[in-house]
Amino acid sequence: MRPQELPRLAFPLLLLLLLLLPPPPCPAHSATRFDPTWESLDARQLPAWFDQAKFGIFIHWGVFSVPSFGSEWFWWYWQKEKIPKYVEFMKDNYPPSFKYEDFGPLFTAKFFNANQWADIFQASGAKYIVLTSKHHEGFTLWGSEYSWNWNAIDEGPKRDIVKELEVAIRNRTDLRFGLYYSLFEWFHPLFLEDESSSFHKRQFPVSKTLPELYELVNNYQPEVLWSDGDGGAPDQYWNSTGFLAWLYNESPVRGTVVTNDRWGAGSICKHGGFYTCSDRYNPGHLLPHKWENCMTIDKLSWGYRREAGISDYLTIEELVKQLVETVSCGGNLLMNIGPTLDGTISVVFEERLRQMGSWLKVNGEAIYETHTWRSQNDTVTPDVYTSKPKEKLVYAIFLKWPTSGQLFLGHPKAILGATEVKLLGHGQPLNWISLEQNGIMVELPQLTIHQMPCKWGWALALTNVI
């Protein structure tokens, strides 16, 4: 055999050897297959990023943003419950023949700028967002094939809102992109027919809910899928376990997606990736399962309200308190804003988001990627604790600066010669005294208001305490 012939003959031989080799191992995700049962699905390990993130932004935006009065449940309260203030609002502001569907063309999103939103969310210090892709009114913020003429492509904005925000978030920020989706719709005729059959008929989930969920996941690849609105129907009606098995086994986000617990009547706080248990849920104690506190900056509504007064909005001090208490008990905070019908994030919401971001720039070390400590709060002062065990760090977060300049901590036990205490944003080691019973007294630095590392709460990093 001449040397120059070797490559020509070696190639088919190499190809044959490659064909005979066993196939390469499948990606790690397929090592564990999940069955369409709660027992199997609940055993799935929650992707680590979610617990590390700690803080996300919820966005309630839809046709309900047009009346922007009372609540995002406007349609239900006006048409179904006929609550007087909603009925009067319509009488005073719209002609007698006006239907809820007529709000659709008025939902213009004229000033919606996805890049601007993304920049505000990045500045907030949040690590993920959750956009309402469809609320109980049924209007989809993308051009759903299964929501003909009641979606953001055919009506109102004439734009794919979900896609625009997804692209902006992924191109301009380090946030994870998530979507909220309402399983049911208040007045959809197929749902109402199924309901009248005590959910023995399943026309609505088969023709609407499930196709839309597959469409959302395949087209936009959300890493949070936040289900809501079971309409009183059990998870078997929705085929929740079948869908989740596909999501965890086959979908394009199978390795990173996290889900909540609202997949049918009776599943809340019982099944799913993380628990929400109720709106504005803040148990104040450690839970054995990962959970999320979804709450609103506007105390009374998830959607934007034109009639809201300044006292209806939580202050930044109250929001920081919500965040630190939630994280100390093992939860994530999902803080909600409601944009206006034209796509503007009002200045009150923007200010709160940016304030939270400035606080997290200083104190994020005590929030992101932390674990719960043996004590969630202190019995001596109203402080909360987080920890990073590998770094031998415990963080004590306090919301009131003591006038004496001395902070008493009842739970940490100091180790002489090893314990070090620093104020985040200040950096210099602080003097401390070990107390006779338990705990330590920390001598805080004497700072003017302008020298304070932040204005609404502070964190001490305690190294080597037990």
Image: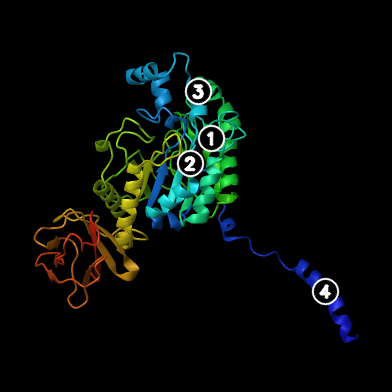
Residue at image x 32%, y 52%?
Answer: 356
Tag on residue 354? none
Q: Which residue is mark 4?
A: 11
Say which amino acid is labelled 4.
Phe
Residue 143 pos. (x, y %): 59, 36
Say which amino acid is labelled 3.
Asp
Say which amino acid is labelled 2.
Phe
State the separation of the CA atoms marked 2 and 4. Answer: 57 Å
Is any part of residue 447 visible from this angle?
yes
Residue at image x 52%, y 38%?
Answer: 240
State the separation of the CA atoms marked 3 and 1. Answer: 14 Å
Q: Which residue is mark 2?
A: 112
Mark closer to the observer (4, 3): 3
- Quarter containing the C terminus: bottom left
Q: Which residue is mark 3?
A: 102
Q: Secondary structure at mark 2?
A: loop
Residue 128 pos. (x, y %): 43, 51
The one nearer the camera, 331 or 169, is 169
